[in-house]
Amino acid sequence: MVVVVVCGCIQLASLRERHREELSSLCCEHYRLELEVQLTHGPALRCRLEQLLAAARDTCQARLNRTHDAEVTELKKKLDAQNWEEMKALARRIRDKSELAR
């Protein structure tokens, strides 16, 4: 009986060692394949990402410019209306046109 248990421990240790070696080999192969994919497809992927980022940046910039232009237009209208009201108020108070021009 003792011999069987010792033999089982030896088999278990042997299986563990074989499993460890296979796992190590599998990890090395996986790393090698990932590196190969990065080296072959990495530049194309980076180029595509740069294109996508540039397109997104241009879209955001265009939207920002439209918003800015709309705000400027709205502000100009408000200022023109305010100026017009001030000029009307001045015209009512000052009847002399030459004094109004100053």
Image (tube, grey):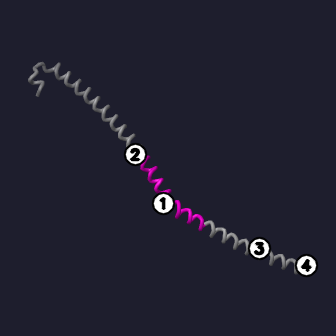
- Check disc 2: other Cα within 10 Å, few if <14, some if 14-19, many if 20+: few
Horizontal relation, residue 65 to residue 15: left or right:
left
Q: Amino acid at mark 4?
A: Met
Dot 4: element: loop
Q: Report the front residue among 24 and 49.
A: 49
Residue 29: image x %, image y %? Answer: 63, 68
**Of discs 4 and 2, which sits in the foreground?**
2
- Check disc 1: other Cα within 10 Å, few if <14, some if 14-19, many if 20+: few
Residue 59: image x %, image y %? Answer: 41, 43
Q: Report the front residue among 94 and 46.
A: 46
Q: Tell me if label 3 and label 4 are in contact, CB under 8 Å.
A: no
Q: Amino acid at mark 2?
A: Asp
First-in-chain label (3 vs 2)? 3
| Residue for badge 2 | 58
The Cα atoms of the two marked residues, 3 and 4, are separated by: 21 Å
Disc number placed over residue 1 in the picture, else none: 4
First-in-chain label (2 vs 1)? 1
**Of discs 3 and 2, which sits in the foreground?**
2
Residue 69: name its quadrant.
Answer: top left
First-in-chain label (3 vs 4)? 4
Q: Which residues are magenta?
A: 31-55
Reply yes or no: does residue 53 show up in magenta.
yes
| Residue for badge 3 | 15
Reply yes or no: does residue 4 show up in magenta.
no
Q: Tell me if label 4 and label 1 are in contact, CB under 8 Å.
A: no
Q: At x 28% / y 29%, what residue is drawn? A: 77
**Of discs 2 and 1, which sits in the foreground?**
1
